[in-house]
Amino acid sequence: VAQNAAEPKTGERNFTAQLLWATNDGKPDDPKLEPVDPQLEAQLKKVFKWKHYFKAEDEQHFGVAKKGSRTVKLSKKCEIEVTDLGKPMVEVKLFGEGKLVQTLKKPTVGCIVIGGPDKDDTAWLVVLTEK
């Protein structure tokens, strides 16, 4: 069951997810796209090849119960499923247009970035952080 921006409950792990668009071109015409925080952009540039990163949607705040899962819709085409595997480990599944794009199992140290390619040498990324 998809849930949007539900406030975390006591005993849950608290997360924030941001949907980003990565490109080497300048700011696109879409007025909805805003540049990401400069500190986050600097971190992303150390790992990925793109020069510019833009927020595609508002960030989502949500909780995941111990040993539970939560599916969060980030846009019309993108959602993630976050499963608590026991601190600090999580499994993150990324879905694009209803299809599984990628699965990661990682500790939530710093942030987790998961994504997929888009047209014209661009990409969309989800940045997941635990609060």
Image: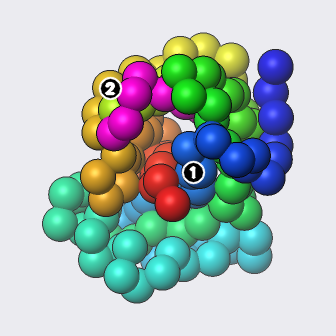
Q: Quadrant of the N terminus?
A: top right
Residue depicted at 42% across the width and 61% down the height: 23
Observer-nearest of 73 and 63: 63
Q: Distance between the residues labelled 1 and 2?
A: 15 Å
Residue at figure coordinates x 70%, y 54% from the top left: 60
* Residue at far bottom of view: 38
Say what amino acid the circle numbered 1 marks: Phe
- Which residue is nearer to you in this view: 35 or 111? 111
* Residue at 59% across, 50% down: 14
Q: Which mark is residue 15?
A: 1
Q: Give the range drawn in magenta.
A: 78-88
Classify mark 1: residues with Cα within 10 Å, few (<14), some (14-19) or many (20+): some
Which of the two discs, 1 and 2, labels the residue nearer the N terminus?
1
The x and y percentages for residue 44 are: 30, 64
**Residue 120 placement (x, y as % from top left):** 44, 47
Residue 82 on image: x %, y %: 55, 30
